Amino acid sequence: HASAVSTRVGTGSWVHLMSCAMWASGTGARALSSAGAGPSGTRARSHRPVRASSENKLRSSISRHDSRGRGTPSVSTGVISRDALNTFIETTTETVDDDETQLSLDGDRSRDEPNERSQQIYVDADRVALPSLADSEFGEHAAAFLSGNFQPLTEELTTSVECGGDLEDDDDLLDVAPSGSFSEVFEGFVGIDSSLSDAPEQMRVVGTVPPGFPDGKFSYVGPNPKFDRSHYKKWGTGPEHVDVGFGEGWHHWFEGDGMVYAVDFEKMNDCDDGEANASAKKACSNVSEKMHLNSRSNTNHTRRLITYRNRYVRTNSWHDELKQDKRLFAPLMNASGKSFLPHAVSNFLRGGYFLKDSANTALASYGGKMLALQDTMPPWEIDGDSLETKGACDFDGQLPFYVPFTAHPKRAPDTGNLHFFGFNPVYPPHISMGSLDPDLKMSNVKALWHNALQGATFMHDFCVTTKRVVLFEGSMNIRPLRMLSGQHPLRYDQTQNARFGFAARCPVSGDATGEVTWIDCGCHQMVYHFINAWEDSVTGNVVVVGVREDGFFHGALQANGTRKWIKDAFEKGEATPRVHRWEIDPATNEMVSQTWLFEDIVEVPRINDAFAGVKNQFAYAGRVHESSLADDAQLKFDAVVKFDLDTGQTDVYEHGVGRYGMEQQFVPRQGAVDEEDGWLVMYVHDEAACAVACDEFACAESDENGVNGVGLPQTPRSLCDTAATGRSECVILNAKDLRGGPVARIALPSRVPYGAHAHWTPKEDEVKTTVTTGNASAAAARRVAENPPKPKMFAVAEGTLGALAGTAVTGLLRGASGLFVNGWRPWIGLDTNTNQYAFVRLFGGRFVEARKLGSRREMEIAEEEQDGSGFVFGDALSVDDDGNSNAPSLLLYEREGCGECKRVRETLSMLDLACHLRPCPLGATKHRKLLDKALLANGFVLENKNKKLPYLEDASTGAALVGADAIVGYLYDEYLDGSAPSPLVRSGFLANLRAQFAADARGAGDGSGPNPTGALRKGPSGAYYARPSTTPIKPLQLWAYEASPFCSLVRETLSELEIPYVLMPCARGSPRRTALQNRTGTFQVPYLEDPNTGCGLFESSEIVRYLRASYQATPPVEKA
């Protein structure tokens, strides 16, 4: 079912095909895309009947671009998820005339037809439905929360698109979808069809982002396990689980790794910018309060850049587990009572913590920091622009080590201070509370002590009013003594009454002072999320509104028996989550009233955050889709409900059949005073193709063309088992008119798995640390073209001394292996050929370096010298006399930080062998997917992926080998005429351990120098882990040798960005030193050549700078 894909673009052409001079001109399409550790991939298309002409016209209107260069984002190579089937396709990128209107599939071209710009890639199976999981293997809860759109998404992307302004009008919702149907709007982008349609990873704006919509970042976080699903089987049955026995353990949704998904809105012509934008000002001021489906008559004068990116929160556990390629943390939430304590102890011994630091629950922005939060753990700081992880945050040592940080901190309505509490389930004090002022100065942290033997009461949310902090202890408690009888320590305890706690705030500082006064609720209750709290202006009573659920989700997320429990709860109707109101008299500390306000079953409530802590009228929440929860054990929201807390009325926007939303975020209009003057922004995922017209065997009721009533082809039922093939979008609703439907829909390049909580960061709270990829790439090439870096002997750039010292230590521990070619020996001889490289020339003599290479390599050297044209074997930038590629026959999959891989690279330098390298850093996806396919094709069993590195293929002999011992032995046997390997690299006693020890001595220095978006340096080097990047069309070429510290910094960056490259070894004694000298006029390494831009440059610091600007998905802002 694979066919070739031809991507058509405008006159700008793809920047990757331009020379430096063309890049310097600044031309190029406005729509930008870069894909990270897995780029957004082109997918295969099923063979099916052609749709009606009207539907084809619709597809054309959605995919078009105009003569001004407006286009959809570029498509790079594809990736697959770790447990998906491997599918191979070909892609090409072509330049066509401006009047071409759509991306098309070239189904007529034979796959065997030669095309020099085609490349084979994988279908991105991160977004392809996988088989449903068995309850018996995963448990009922885990099977549900690892399937459908809960299925893990391992790729990380960055994609941008422009809309509005002087660009062609955005697709109009009324024109493309008269009935407002999502399937009409994104025909070809929904359900099962989305993974098989025309380049569905286009990012597209349909409708109009309203002129008054502010700049800022909409972000969302949720659990997203980083390993393939087999790792989350019942504990002890998955890959390399360390089963400590005693009982069972099952994966829980809350224990998945945190991933953040964000959409940035940035005006490119501000409505307030001077007289030149008078028409735009008028348009902004005259916008109707009622934002409805826009027509083309409502021209949007505000031009915007909209950027989507997603990133893992790279916590300690994320790094450590990836390095081991296995789960280190055993499950606790759904562990049996007998296994809970052994699992907790095992976690501490193997991972350093009792609880996994997932940072997967919520987000907060305050004092210039963006925090990823999780109950029971300290916050993790992420870059508010790039989303890259900076590290664990203790606010410069102010947060005590024993105090976690709530997932739901609150800003005080009067001071603006950020209040928090910390719930520590392991040891007392179980509850602590404090606050931060805007300068991030922390108040005294107040501890609330409990009886340690008795345990603690779980707390998740709280409120802050103008006069007090309002705490809530529900009926969910932790009793360690339960484990003695084989019970889980965490339970919803109906014998424990819920209670509110009031802590008065200081009128001057606003900090919580004095003792906490507790008010009993009179019965068992549980609240995960409050809506708001305030002091009534008439009575002075404290009013609290929230979603009361009385243990519903504790039962609904249990490991097994989940569906029955949920159905019973729905039948009883007592514990279902609904909006509830409490009124408390603070003078008498008595409960005045408790009232259920609405019958809608909802969760994740939100308000206009400007009204937090004061009286408000409106709240918004996701309506629980009851059948999904009861039948599939999956928590999904089929509608947004707007609650009027004063009148008791509701307004509902339903997402549509098979469509489910995530938590909605209120975004106020610029300068708004009215509480509901703004928009709701949320992610919506479409499962329509898998939710309708499906019988036991296929999507039924198809017409004579095989298309059913919802416009979908007849599809095998097996492909409809999950929703992972659907399309996700970012939806903007007018908060005043939910029923009017979206004012804009932004089709995203990848699905967004169902997660936890949303967040809005206004532009004024953001710190810009990155630049647009295309602009940075063009600037980097222009800089190199206009002012090529001059080679400097042993120049150390600012901020790189520590990294260079670390790589030098590694080299010393390896005995300078890779510094010299095999048989190297020096002497002084006559200087008879001034064209040959010499380290020293003096008085008619020169420093001569002899060698002893294999006969095969010596024949190549002789041919190069006889040719005299500068031709070099293995030079990927050149071709032979017949026009054939000169790429090396050796292909190596490897990674930095791996001792075995280092032994192989040392061997390549010593034997002077050019090699095509495909770096596979930890957390990468695209090269590791290619590695998986290569391993499978050659009969290797896939288990621990890191243990399958290094992996070498030799196209000249057909050899395929895994492991340093086998590869080193093969290279010496094949390329050094059967000689025994050097003692520096040969197998033997502790050979790999010694190499790994040297690699680990590299240290944590950042070879990029001062880098405002530097990722957390965890372990020996951050370069051991992938950083999202674009994929070059052609591999780069690096002239270097293994033992050079300067070359190491460049090699680490290539690895970190997962950039394929050809290594041209230039160890001492290599004839390539002469070849490089003749090519550039001098010899110095590292020297990088980029055939995609025509650029070549010296100096490691400049090369790293160029690579980050050209290929990093979020290039750092460079210093002036």
Image (tube, grey):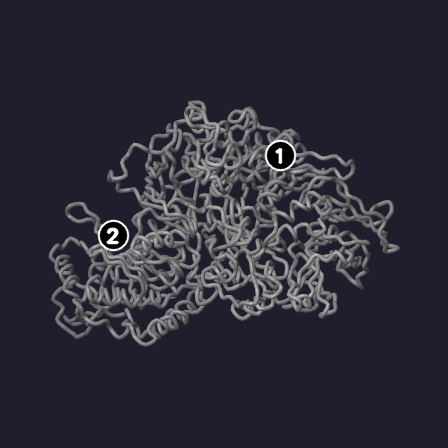
Mark 2 or mark 1: whose residue is earlier in sequence: 1
Q: Residue at x 60, y 56 (%)?
A: 373
Q: CA distance from mark 2 to mark 1?
A: 56 Å
> Depth check: 931 or 1120 in front?
931
Q: Quadrant of residue 629?
A: top right
Q: Quadrant of the N terminus?
A: top left
What element does badge 1 sit on? strand
The residue sitting at the right extreme is 588
- Crowd around label 1: few <14 · some 14–19 · many ≥20 (10 Å): some
> Depth check: 1061 or 297 in front?
1061
What kind of residue is marked 2?
Ala
> Depth check: 817 or 360 in front?
360
Q: Identify residue for label 2.
A: 876
Q: Identify residue for label 1.
A: 654
List x then y, in percent, for residue 336.
60, 62
List x then y, in percent, for residue 323.
44, 63
